Amino acid sequence: MLRCAYVLLFLLFAVLPKARGQETKHNISFDFYEGTFNANFDSSLSVDIDQELTPRVIRSFYATLIKGNYQPLTDSLITYRKNHQLNDWLYYQLVRKVAQQVSPKEHNYSRYTLYKWFLLAKTGYDARLALTSNKVIFYVRNTEEVEDIPFFNIDGKKYVCINFHDYPNTDLNQDPPMPVKVDIEEAKNPFSFKIDKMPDFKPEQYFDKKLQFTYEHKAYYFNIKLNPNVESIFKNYPVVDFESYFNIPVSKQTYSSLIPMLKSIVKAMDQKKGIDYLMRFTRYAFLYESDEDNFGKEKRLSPEETLFAKYSDCDDRVALFFYLVKQIYNRPMIAVLYPTHITAAVQFDKPVGSPLIYQGKAYSFCEPTPQADDLKIGEISAKLQNVPYKVVYQYTPPIVP
């Protein structure tokens, strides 16, 4: 009789549900730029769904997750974002990597997207989903000017699509997405594409790239340190407004391998000649190719991407030139946009050539992109002299007290 009682007790404990948190977690751990991300993922958050989504499936997915033990995972994301001062775009790369660990994109794209949406929304961002006949579209609220990706408006607020790169050559006008309404208390904040800080990559992750160009019959050689993670960061980065674009920095190791050397070279030159050197470095140290030929679409490279890339075009050169002049001379500058070209102009103490007058100040053209003629400071291509233009960005150095 006693033996039967033991058997019954054993069977009872075997079939009872395990206490919450007991043997239900596995650790998520991976290197993320300068640090290591660690978090616990509770099995209560593991939800199986089909590839084909419906509003009911999405709401059911969310209802299941909020009943699970999601807080340790979202808390870990928020803490990592704060400790490493991640801007929104870099934080989204972290969310993507976590979602990939939880539900690999290649196994079930819809499920992967739902985890991204849940994690971004539960950590404070106004993220939404919409469905077409066969696609799940992931949107975030954004208040900036962003080109080349679809958007829609809800109650006067703009939501931009951040997974459109997964659906190349798709015309959403032919199959309009229908928003799926899910009320998420934490999902309040707009998402920004501004990148004001690059990660502190580990030094061992860099490789060397050699550059050279000739200035006044003398060859100059550079050995620049670059990080392959930069390409992945900007792979799906959209075309942002010029203010955001012209203020993207470079990483510390890349900065240290280039800027001090340029400062050393131009130290013996007067300011005009030094800026002429930077203009010609940007013009001739890199191969030119249009975005259409290079990427098949408009794509603006950050300064670090331009150093990395085999080919670059006019807006890439202007962004790099802006960055170099800002770091070395910190002069006021403007970006001048023509219908088919963009160039730069610098405010000198005394104008050079035929200056462009903007808001009462004289700026001298500095063309950083190869042209048919060897343009000097203060000169603009003859084919642009009578063409309408627009100043799309003005940099004014901050006043230091």
Image (spheres, rainbow, N blue to C red):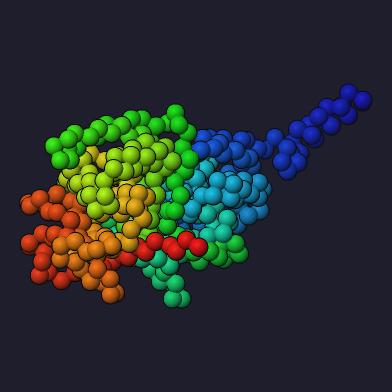
Q: Residue at x 67, y 38 (%)?
A: 24
Eyeballing the image, is 254 above or below 139?
A: above
Eyeballing the image, is 383 above or below 26?
A: below
Q: Nearer the viewer, residue 213 or 102?
A: 213
Q: Nearer the viewer, residue 316 or 380?
A: 380
Q: Nearer the viewer, residue 56 or 210?
A: 210
Percent position of residue 209, x then y: 29, 32
Percent position of residue 191, x then y: 47, 60
Whether residue 79 is visible to the viewer of this picture, yes or no, is: yes
Horizontally, residue 8 falls left or right of residue 261, namely right
Horizontally, residue 69 falls left or right of residue 194, namely right
From this viewpoint, which residue is outermost toward the top? 3
Percent position of residue 122, x then y: 58, 56
Horizontally, residue 262 falls left or right of residue 27, namely left
Percent position of residue 268, x then y: 28, 43
Horizontally, residue 27 falls left or right of residue 375, namely right
Q: Quadrant of residue 287?
A: top left
Q: Residue at x 81, y 29 (%)?
A: 10
Whether residue 299 is visible to the viewer of this picture, yes or no, is: no
Which corner quadrant holds the N terminus? top right
